[in-house]
Amino acid sequence: MERLISLAGNLLAAIGLMICLGAGLVRLSGNFHLFGYSAMTVFMAGTGLMVMACLAKLELLLLRKRE
């Protein structure tokens, strides 16, 4: 279970970071939309994924503390 939560946290963080970087690069290039969505909306989705990754890592720390 710990390995699954750790893997999920790492995967969510990597995906969130890539989405945020992509949205930032699109916005810096002067465009406002990415795949039909506002660049800020895509950026917020990436931020949400990184927050979810942080919560998964926090749960992992709490699981280790209980043992």
Image (cartoon, helix red, strand yellow):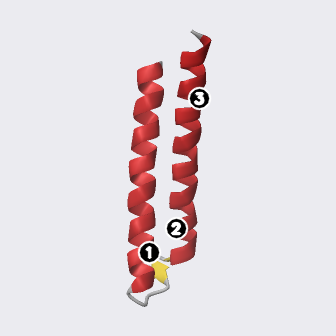
Q: Quadrant of residue 10?
A: top left
User: Whole-percent x and y of residue 54?
Assistant: 55, 42
- Asked if one can make out residue 38 in the rendered structure from this viewpoint, the answer is no
Q: Residue at x 53, y 26 (%)?
A: 60
- The amino acid type found where label 3 is placed reads Glu
Q: Secondary structure at mark 1?
A: helix
Query: Residue sitting at 42 percent across and 90 percent down?
Result: 30
Q: Residue furthest top?
A: 67
* Mark 2 vs 1: CB contact within 8 A: yes
Q: Tell me the tag on residue 59.
A: 3
Q: Earlier in the sequence, mark 2 or mark 3?
A: 2
Instruction: State if disc 3 and disc 2 touch (CB < 8 Å).
Output: no
- Mark 2 or mark 1, which has the lower sequence index? 1
Q: Which mark is residue 24?
A: 1
Residue 47 vs 51, above or below: the answer is below
Q: Nearer the viewer, mark 2 or mark 3?
A: 3
Residue that carries the numbered disc 2 in the rendered image? 43
Q: Tell me residue 53's x, y (percent).
A: 51, 43
Element carrying mark 2: helix
Position of the C terminus by quadrant: top right
